[in-house]
Image: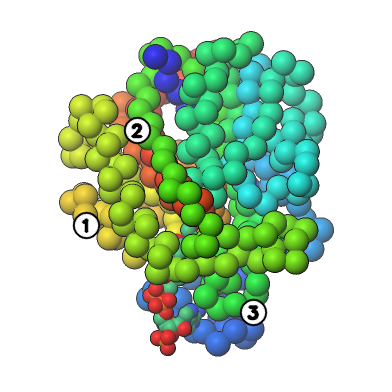
Amino acid sequence: MNGLQILGTGRALPEHVVTNDDLAKIVDTSDEWIVSRTGIKERRFAREGETLTQFAVEAARQAIARAGIRPEDLGLCLMGTVTSDNATPAQSCLVHQALRLPEDCPAFDLSAGCSGFLYAMETAAALLPRMSRPYALILGGELLSRITNMEDRSTCILFGDGVGAVVVKSTQDAPWYAHLGARGERDILWSGGMGSEERYLHMNGQEVFKFALETVPQAARTLLAKAGMEKEQVDWYVLHQANHRIVESVARRLKVPLSKCYENIERYGNTSAGTIPIALDEMAEQGLLKAGQWIMCLGFGSGMTWGGALFQWQDKEEK
Ligand code: UT7
């Protein structure tokens, strides 16, 4: 079966930094509470007039350039998001338009909450062999500030805005193991949608926490079993950045060192479907990802959904 090789990564976040002290001026909270309960120090919020499209297009352009391909080489364009600029067309179609992608490059969004990027990756792994060309642009990201009630201290301290992107190639040479799941459930984490009167995110934080600790370690074990690997053989665990305490607890349950878990939550908060591709881009930029290393990405979110992917980082062939 064909797997995915990541050829290039990109990310784009708003410039506007919002610190915990800034939020403490709006709601009854403190830097000390937020840091100790979540690990978050600051996040980015889009300014009035900024759009998800502009961040998505910027991240996509970087990923395409680093992959060494041209937009017209793409055979598929997917985006995991729940905060598309429009109810329709899909966010991925707005990216398609901006990048002038070819007509035989289908584009659609996946709504799987914070698992959206991993749902999109596995969809690409399955679909790409049937497309006109073997390259896909896969994005994940949000403007969660648009659906966050800034007067609700239980949610406004957690979320942030940002988009990550990867360009992948479908190839038999790339090992690829994935595992997706869902426990259909509305009331733990939901929003009525951007245009709705109930657009704000509603969340039972403790239930989400519990859900993550039930599903994420299990997803990791499933992936290791599929690959016939031991947890020690994985070089990097890239977990959805929702809460430092969740990353810590998952690492403890899996008995893997925290030093193998990449974290950037202190700078960006939870950007939902954006956290994993943004992390991959930072890791690539910092030279942390080396050819031959095994990467396990794990996510969970609204739905309630979860997803995981285990793959090997490979140097891209010079085109
Ligand atoms: O992508 C998935 C998205 N969501 C998540 O991953 C959320 C997962 N859950 C969490 O991260 C944590 O449950 C939270 C960070 C949301 C909350 O932490 P917690 O340790 O579960 O706190 P809690 O909800 O049990 O609240 C403890 C106390 C409460 O006060 P009382 O009832 O003990 O007096 C809250 O009212 O902390 C209070 N509280 C706050 N205090 C200061 C809740 N939010 C805040 C706040 N600042 N921002």
Closer to the camera in the image, 121 or 36: 121
For disc 2, the marked residue is 310
- Residue 231 location, quadrant: top left
The x and y percentages for residue 65 are 62, 28
Residue positioned 49% across, 54% down in the render: 185
Q: State if disc 2 and disc 3 touch (CB < 8 Å).
A: no
Quarter containing the N terminus: top left
For disc 3, the marked residue is 151
165 displayed left or right of 253: right
Quarter containing the C terminus: top right
The amino acid pointed to by label 2 is: Leu
Q: State if disc 1 and disc 2 touch (CB < 8 Å).
A: no
Q: How is the image coloured?
A: rainbow
First of labels 2, 1 by sequence position: 1
- Splitting the image into four quadrants, where does ligand 1 fall? bottom left
Residue positioned 54% across, 50% down in the render: 113
First of labels 1, 3 by sequence position: 3
Mark 1–mark 3 Cα distance, whole angstroms, equals 34 Å
Residue 56, visible in the rendered structure: yes
For disc 1, the marked residue is 252
The x and y percentages for residue 92 are 69, 35
Q: Label 1, secondary structure: give it.
A: helix
First of labels 3, 2 by sequence position: 3
